[in-house]
Amino acid sequence: MVQVTRRHLLKGAAAAGAFAALPGPLVREARAQTTQKRELVVAQGGDISKFDPHFSTSSNDIRVSFNLFDNLLSRRPDGRLYPGLATEWKREGQTTWSFKLRPGVRWHTGDVFTSADVKWSLERTWDPKQNTRVNTVFTTIDRIETPDATNVVVHTKKPDPLLPARLAFYGGQIVPKKYLEAVGNDAFNARPVGTGPVRFVSWTKDDKVVLEANPDYWGGRIDADRVIFRSVPETAPRIAALLKGEVDVITQLPPDHGERVAGAGATQVVGALYAGLYVLAVNSKRPPLDNPLVKQALSLAVDRELIVKELWRGRGIVPSGPVAKGDNHYDPALPPLAYDPREARERLRKAGYKNEEIVIETTVGYTANDKPMSEAIQGMWREVGVNAKVEVVEYSVRAQKNRDRTFKGLWWSDPTSTLGDPDGMMWRLLGPGGPQDYWRHPRFDELGEAARFSVDEKFRGEAYREMTKVFLEHFPWIPVVQPYEDYGLQKYVEWTPNPNQQFEIRRFNFKFRRA
Amino acid sequence: MRGTLGFLAHRLLRALIALWLVSTVVFVVMRLSGDPVPLLLPPDAPRSEIFRVRTELGLDRPLPVQYATFLANVLRGDFGRSIHFREPAARVVLGYLPATFELGLAAFAFAVLVAVPIGVLSAARRNSLLDHAAMGVALVGQAAPTFFLGILFILLLSLKAGLLPTGGRGDWHHLVLPALTLGIFAMASIARLTRSAVLEVLRADFIRTARAKGLSERLVVAKHTLKNAAIPILTITGLQFGTLLGGAVVTETVFAWPGMGRLAIQSIYNRDYPVVQCTVFLSAVVFIAINFVIDLLYGLLDPRVRRA
């Protein structure tokens, strides 16, 4: 995902320090832990750029669009798929999926939602004339049939085990055919119409988005009359707004500020384990990184537990391999990646490492903790005799290098598991022609390709287990941490976040605590 | 009369050249700084998609052609379509203008209304306690980074004292902290310069004459000194307006103020060329216009300038 807004502009260590040092007790300390509020105010790190869900995948945008719109299926905080606009779905044969639509659903305009909207929405994503930003999501679909108003049949070109998962994430939001055809894309983006739990009221750029509850929502009316998304780019003022009670929820709460929010009396920290990993991706074409022994040594030399404890304040776990915890086919029996500096030295010796320079190209704040982690790892590598160097690059330079595949050595990547499955993560990124294609291995490639097009989950599980084994010998990524994504909440807000930044406000996961 | 017209024409020509230079520099710098397309597309977008978007945005054409089109369009007031927002850049930027204007004006008014009296008083009571205190505060105001001051104000006045909101735009309560943060640097430098300008005039012969005539000190300062000290004060005020525009970038970010400065920063990160070009151009127009007005005021205050 492109997440420009995740960089913390002007993130001043001085200011953060001053903030942490400020002594308690705060204005709101003794305030009640219940509320009579009918308005939910969410502050996030940047403004949205678009409402049209097919024209953006940035995290700030989808926090809003997943509430205006619905998907056929929905992935809930427990990581499983639940009915959305479709009440039932099943696979018939290898390449045919049928979906039964929820009856009686209406668009915010009052029009009835039908199978024609579904067909039109999905076809819109890849229509070259529409030119959407999600045109690669449904490349496996061959054609869509609508036998009647409440049934949809999707034919895929090859068996696609992950079609339901694709339908549950970005690109899969269903938009209104009739309204869009009548007003066009620009007017739709200015006054979006969906089926979701909230409907559009107004948008003041870089200030706030105002939404109101959809009283007839099929999933039940939400426990607020209005939902407001404010954009507060700086971390310290965002936290101040929460502590002062101006907002109810803040996103992107850095781990080193968690204690402050948790200890303030009226506020709390709620997190979800990130659906993905923070890894050092490796340019395995560059000597000495083409030598698996060197990469094994680099992995063994990283004290991940220390990183989690010191830099993440315990808000993360040590990965066991390339599959994120919570994903399909995650192997709970696999031990966390080992720290063994002596063995690292030994493998460097065996590899015949000749003190070649190994460079980490890091951004500052593209992912949380990227620069501090780079410096810590540089130190750990130097301990075992690696000539490690950290170079700082600007975000757009990183994007360019990513596109041209010209990284010098290692760089930070935060692969998101978009489908809750290894296919949507390691195979999407590390596969042939993928954005991080710097390393090829015949067996890995064969299994990845076969698992992508197999609907036999047992076979897929075995394939990913074997791919993990290959991965742990060659380390095309050096996984470092699977962090929690934390939010700051007023104590009177009960809300469960999703692991994949799909910020949802629904009846089942959000409630104001009333007196 | 002819002198005045010539003076005006000369200034106008210089303003136009400055605008052309500014837009050219921005054009070149933005192109040097990188490609917007990788930022627009997901990291796994195929190469063909990247080329398609480049063509769609006209980025595949040679630079001189892009430059010529750019200049021709600017002359017609067309800054192109925003890559990020997908609507005319000028419309995007104008949408942000009122917020910045409100903040800038409040900060400027605060700076001038506080700085000039303080500077004059400090000069009139040179080496008094008031002088030392005022100049000490001014020194801090000039030295402290806007970012730091902003966060400090939020922590102390908003969070601890609970007086004012932490950010966002709304009624006048929302305006106080950002205007204070933004205006303080300009305030400090205007106050310091006012003080030295007034001190310099106070040493002049005609002031000694005025005093010798038996005029009260108050009258000496108010009537004979201020008008003569006005030129350097006006100059620094005009220049400080520029730093206000620059400072707005940081202030708006800290206070989540939906203004042009924040738009500019975001657009630079997004490599949204048309919007960056339009914001910089508009800022340059404002800056040049303010200085143009100040030039005119010079002429009013001191007829000798018109002939220079």
Image (cartoon, rainbow, N blue to C red):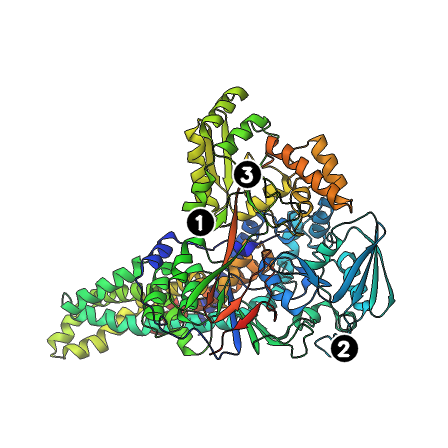
Left or right of A20: which side holds A432? right
Left or right of A244: which side holds A446? right
Along the line of sight, which residue is nearer the eye, A300 or B6?
A: A300
Say whether mark 1 and mark 2 are on the same chain: yes
Along the line of sight, which residue is nearer the eye, A325 or B1?
A: A325
**Mark 2, residue position:** A111
Number of marks in picture: 3
Give the Cα distance between marks 2 and 1.
Answer: 49 Å
Query: Looking at the rendering, in which quadrant would you find the C terminus of chain B?
Result: bottom left
**Mark 1, residue position:** A314
Q: Residues within 10 Å of mark 1 (few under 14, many from 20)?
A: some
Identify the residue shown where x is 62% and y is 59%. Answer: B84
User: What is the three-letter code of the residue carrying label 1?
Assistant: Gly
Give the Cα distance between marks 3 and 1.
Answer: 18 Å
Identify the residue shown where x is 43% and y is 39%. Answer: A376
Tell me which label, 2 or 1, sits earlier in the chain.
2
Q: Is residue B299 visible?
A: no
User: Of circles 2 and 1, which is in front?
Assistant: 1
Give the Cα distance between marks 3 and 2.
Answer: 53 Å
Chain letter for mark 2, please.
A
Give percent across and percent down for residue A203: 58, 72
> Taking A186 as reference, is A408 above or below it?
above
Left or right of A269: which side holds B210? left
